[in-house]
Image (cartoon, coloured by chain):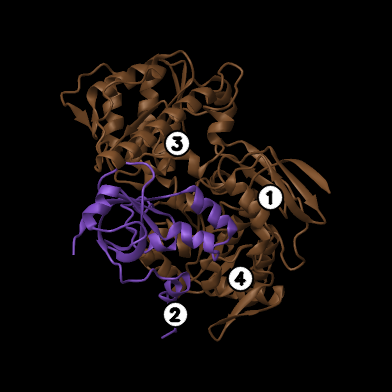
Chain colours: A brown, B purple
Amino acid sequence: MTVVTGVTCPVCGTFCDDIELVVKDNVITDVRNACAMGAAKFLNYSTHRNLRPLVRKNGELVEASIDEAVKRAAEILVDATYPILYGWSNTSCEAIRVGVELTEEVGGVIDNTSTVCHGPSVLSIQDVGIASCTLGQLRHRADLIFYWASNPWSAHPRHIERYTMFSEGRFQKSAWRGYLSRLGGIMSRKRLRRAANLVLRRDVFATPEVERRLPYSMFQKKRKMVVVDVRNTRTAEAADYFLQVEPNKDYELLQAFRMLIRDEELDVSEVAGVPVEILEEVADVMVGCELGILFFGVGLTMSEGKLRNVDAALNLTRDLNSHTKFLIMPMRGHFNVTGADVVFAWQTGYPYAIDFSHGYPRYNPGETSVIDILCRDEADASLIIASDPVAHFPQKAAQNLVKKPLIAIDPEVTPTTLMADVVFPSAFVGIEAHGTAYRMDHVPLPLKKIVEPPKTCLPDTEILQRILHKVRKLRREQN
Amino acid sequence: MPKLKVSLLTGRTIDQGKGKEMGKLSKEYSESVVICQMDPNDMKFLGIKESTNVKVITDFGSVVLKAVKSARVPHPKVAFIPYGPWASLIMNPRTHGTGMPSMKGIPAEIEPAPNEKVLSLHDLLGQFRKEGQP
């Protein structure tokens, strides 16, 4: 039995690097420090995987040799005039680099999951610019933390503990105790409500009024957290203050804050369902903090306004910097989605949605992004790596994706691999293969190889290199 | 039959996150994503109880899901579905020139569907046809 320490967790964008794994006979038997998602991955990764390459023959997926699968995949890509190569955020930067080379060779479109995640944030950052930092700075110095349209308790479970409210920084202490007492309050209120409802036989607390004043903790000289979201979440319960915004109204709320910070008057009584006096008090707290950070989630990029919501958030941060120090950071989802953007950018000049069909990289999200291409039904083949678009794309896009030849490179069995024409079982990067990935704050960290993969499962990098080699050979023969 | 107009949200939940790591074909995963979290007062309006099936309809499709009470209320006329193959059936594919489909704040209608079944993953994928297939 050996204990491997300092393992990075290949699940979410927080990309924790303090995981400890107990390994016995090439099997991970115990996980320490990980969240529920990380532990589920390390302990269950081997229970739902393909072990052999598959090729579709007469409508059925049948086992094939790796060479046969490589040949079939290369034929599909060479025959296609406008293939899309999509996924990339759950694999290593080394594999992504080969992917860009392959896309250039076949004259296709390469896109990563940013396109359905923080793509609008990238567009907005290109327009407005961003005042950001690394997470370590925030752990030690941030005294006002905003989570806007983001629910880290569910999507980035250790983010709060490692970098913000519950982390013990050099200059800012953990707010864990305050949370515990607040949680006690919430629990007793819930119990009281249940008891009152039972006795009175009606819901006496059914429509609680919006609190007209900020709680005392918001005015104390210590770490504070504010959550802005369309619904109450566990993250919101952990916050000192929760602002519930009406759906699709984030833009109005952000612009209202900008006005208040510039000392302008709002001649309405509420904005996006929040009373103006509350907004004024929150704006005062923002201006009065020493170092503030606004983490924003896909609630801004997926709702009405999309990149314009992010424009408003970035501009709000910029305005705040004339009063105090304020920073902003997108809550990136997959562990290497930032790496996918970074590798695409240093290889082609653009972060996502890159079209090589003219022989040189072209970037025009809305036209060259994968959802739009699929909805217009223009792609005639696809290679999907480490992603599951059949499960997560809108129906029309998924339907057009599976209609055409589909190559899937994935260690797991997913709806996409079930609908594919060629399936490559790969080694789990970060467990069975090493590489590099970028944390959400653009810090590159190594992915470790902990156990040996099954013999038939090659790393993503090697599968892509073999396909690239075969594509080049076929094209030479054709010419 | 009563119908309720809602603003539909999709997103992550910790159970969905855990379920996807247990495997997309696992029971844990499908149980975590075939739900529609609603405000209890909205459920009362529809005359349904916990775990009754409901049909969620948008301009882009419809899907039958299990209605469950939200743990944190109130959020009147807002319904939440975790990301997954079922939620994707009713998402808005229009990107407004940004590349990003609209997956939060979509206008939708919910109606009780106690006699309709939730599609299994197998049946759901069966709706997708390969080119050349009948």
Say whether residue B28 is left or right of residue A303.
Answer: right
Dot 2: few (<14), some (14–19), or many (≥20) neighbours within 10 Å? few
Marks 3 & 1 on one chain: yes
Q: Nearer the viewer, residue A34 or A338?
A: A34
Query: Which residue position is annotated with label 3?
Result: A235
Chain of the residue on which disc 3 is drawn? A
Give the mark nearer the N terminus: 4 vs 1.
4
Task: Tell me the amino acid under the disc marked 3.
Answer: Thr
Look at mark 2 in the image and give the residue it sits on.
Answer: B131
Q: CA distance from mark 3 to mark 1?
A: 28 Å
Residues marked 4 and 1 touching at CB (< 8 Å): no
Q: Residue at x 44, y 63 (%)?
A: B85
Residue A109 in sight: no
Give amino acid for label 4.
Val
Mark carried by residue A423: 4
Q: CA–CA distance between discs 3 and 2?
A: 45 Å
Q: Residues within 10 Å of mark 1 (few under 14, many from 20)?
A: many
Location of residue A431 in the rendering, given as x and y in whole percent from the top left corner: 71, 52
Is the residue under label 2 in contact with that under label 3 (CB below 8 Å)?
Answer: no
Q: Label 2: chain?
A: B
Could you tell whether B85 is left or right of A447 in the image?
A: left
The alpha-carbon separation of the residues under discs 3 and 4 comes to: 39 Å
Quarter holding the C terminus of chain A is: bottom right
Residue A40 image point, x, y percent: 62, 52
Residue under label 1, please give it.
A430
Residue at (28, 43) in percent of width and height: A248
| First in residue order: circle 3 vs circle 1 | 3
Q: How many marks?
A: 4
Q: Nearer the viewer, mark 3 or mark 4?
A: 3
Chain where mark 4 sits: A
Between the C-alphas of marks 4 and 1, the distance is 21 Å
